Amino acid sequence: MDELESLTRDLVATPAHDDEAAVGDRIESWLREHTDATVTRDDAPNGGNVIARRGDGDESLALVGHHDVVAPAQSQVADDGTYRIEERDGRLHGRGTADMTGALAAMLLAFRETDPAGELVFASFVGEEDGGVGARHAIERDVAPDYAVVGEGSTGYSGPSTVDVAVAHKGRRASTLRASGTAAHASEPETGENAVYRACDAVDVVRDLDTPATEVLGHRLVGSLVVTEIDGGDAWNVVPDACEVTIDERTVPGDRAALDRATEVEGVSWDVEQDLPPMACDDAAFADAALDAVAGAQDATPEQVVKPHATDAGWLADAGTTCVVCGPAEPGEAHTDAESVSLDALRTCRDAYLEIAARWP
């Protein structure tokens, strides 16, 4: 068993869905023991972000991940409360192997082993699964590197088992339309104002809205807009006075659907519950350097791709960091009861992180 597999196993085994403090402790202690970096632990919720710095220069490059995970299935938890992890057919199976503790292990080794071209930062955030809590906390305290490689999944987009480089990803805006009306007996509907009808009128507006699209470094990124739930009324014989409609919107850099138009329907209001920002790499040279590093670390020919869902790269990009996403997770692995990661992809990512840190900026 090599050091990468051993470190991945150690980190993955540590529970990290309710409180990330324990795995944060392991990451912090490893950095202090195995590197000469300046290591800090901030006061972000659930145990704090772990941030380390080494090297110097006018510009900084960060290797970025998160050490929280979603709640495991019972089959992924051992009798002693640790997370199960096992190797089968060249893959490590267990909660967090793909999203994204495996990538963290690869980043830690690259951070230690490289001779950085400038200031090299390692950052592992808490609360990514809760809307980027840790990333936002760090950014508010001026942790915003010039460049970043975010270790979320980019494997298997251009071809099976190929580690690619994502130069853009969609964001997510979750919102609710709330229609109000006036209750009445269903035998005399004309004496009331039916909130469900108003909600349906608002849904018609949503269905007619244009879906934003954009292009990032020659790659087309198209958003989506979907009504996902509708809830109104509380009795068969009562005209409903309230109805709610939830909307999942996948956003693209620089644009949003004009959902406020739904409020032109009488009695309808609109509230945004979550707005995870999209990401677009704004430096073609950095994206090309990352692709070159990934290409040199594997036999396959990788491509620059786009991802369909949000990551902490969106928060960093909003703060002015030039980002790409590169990690071992494949589509469909994260958040599943059978989550796993390829050991070959982990090794490719470790070598690619080493190379990009040695040559950039």
Image (spheres, rainbow, N blue to C red):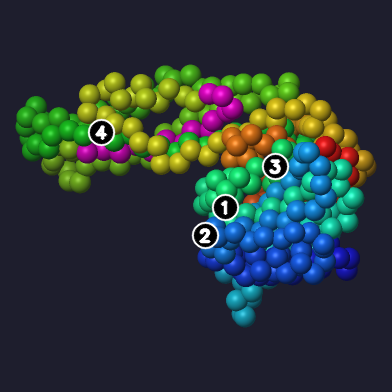
Amino acid type, callout 3? Pro
Q: Which residue is mark 1?
A: 134
Q: Which residue is mark 4?
A: 179
Q: Secondary structure at mark 4?
A: strand
Q: Magenta segment range?
A: 242-255
Position of residue 132 in the picture relative to residue 62 (left or right): left
Q: Which is in the foreground here, disc 4 or disc 1?
A: 1
Place residue 243 in its image quadrant.
Answer: top left
Kindly report the distance in space between the C-alpha atoms of the residues bearing marks 2 and 4.
35 Å
Q: Are marks 3 and 4 in contact (CB under 8 Å)?
A: no
Q: Is residue 338 above or below residue 120?
A: below
Q: Secondary structure at mark 2?
A: loop
Q: Which residue is mark 3?
A: 145
Kindly report the distance in space between the C-alpha atoms of the residues bearing marks 3 and 4.
44 Å
Q: Nearer the viewer, residue 196 or 278?
A: 278
Q: Which residue is mark 2?
A: 45
Place residue 253 in its image quadrant.
Answer: top right
Position of residue 257 in the picture relative to residue 156 (left or right): left
Q: Which is in the foreground here, disc 3 or disc 1?
A: 3
Amino acid type, callout 4? Ala
Amino acid type, callout 2? Pro
**Label 3 vs 2, first from the N-terminus:** 2
Q: Position of residue 307 (x, y in %)?
A: 66, 36
Q: Are marks 2 and 4 in contact (CB under 8 Å)?
A: no
Q: Are marks 2 and 1 in contact (CB under 8 Å)?
A: yes
Q: Nearer the viewer, residue 43 or 83?
A: 43
**Label 3 vs 1, first from the N-terminus:** 1
